[in-house]
Image: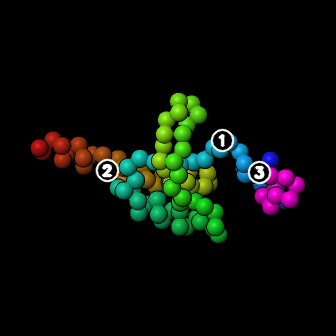
Amino acid sequence: MHGEKCAAKARGSSCTHGMRFEQMPLVTGAVLPVWHCIETIISRNQVGSTGYGRVVRCTTTADETHIIGMTVAASMEEELVEACQPRREANDEADEENRGEH
C-alpha cells in the first residue's frame, strides 16, 4: 500500500501504513498490580523509537468490543505473560482474602 520507496519494505519488513485493520498485541485490564513487571520488560526490550507503550483505543473485528490498551511488541508477549502471571494470581488471592474479612 505504501509504495516502492517504503523504508519498511526496503528492510524486508511488512508495511501496515494505510491499512484499515491491523493486528497488534495489547496489554489490557487491571495493569496497576503488575505495572512494575510490565515496565521492566518493555524498557529492557525497547530499541529505538518503536511506538511500544503507546496507549490505543481499538475495536475488535470479531464482536466490535471497544478495548483500551498499551501496545507491546509481539516478541515481548510471551515474556510478559510468564512474568506477570504469578503476581496477578497472588493479587487475586489477596483480593479474595480481603473480601472474606468484610
x, y (%) of residue 16? 72, 49
Q: Are marks 3 and 2 in contact (CB under 8 Å)?
A: no
Identify the mark at residue 14; answer none if there is no mark: 3
Most extreme residue toward the right is 4
Graded by Cα atoms within 10 Å as few (under 14), some (14 to 19) or many (20 or more), the crowding at tag 3 reads few
Query: Label 2, on which residue?
Result: 90
Q: Amino acid at mark 1?
A: Phe
Q: Residue at x 77, y 54 (%)?
A: 13
Identify the mark at residue 10; answer none if there is no mark: none
Most extreme residue toward the bottom is 48
Q: Are marks 1 and 3 in contact (CB under 8 Å)?
A: no
Residues under labels 3 and 2: Cα distance?
39 Å
Residues under labels 2 and 1: Cα distance?
36 Å
Graded by Cα atoms within 10 Å as few (under 14), some (14 to 19) or many (20 or more), the crowding at tag 2 reads few
Which of the two labelled residues, at mark 2 and mark 1, occupies the earlier sequence position? Answer: 1
Q: Nearer the viewer, residue 40 or 27?
A: 27
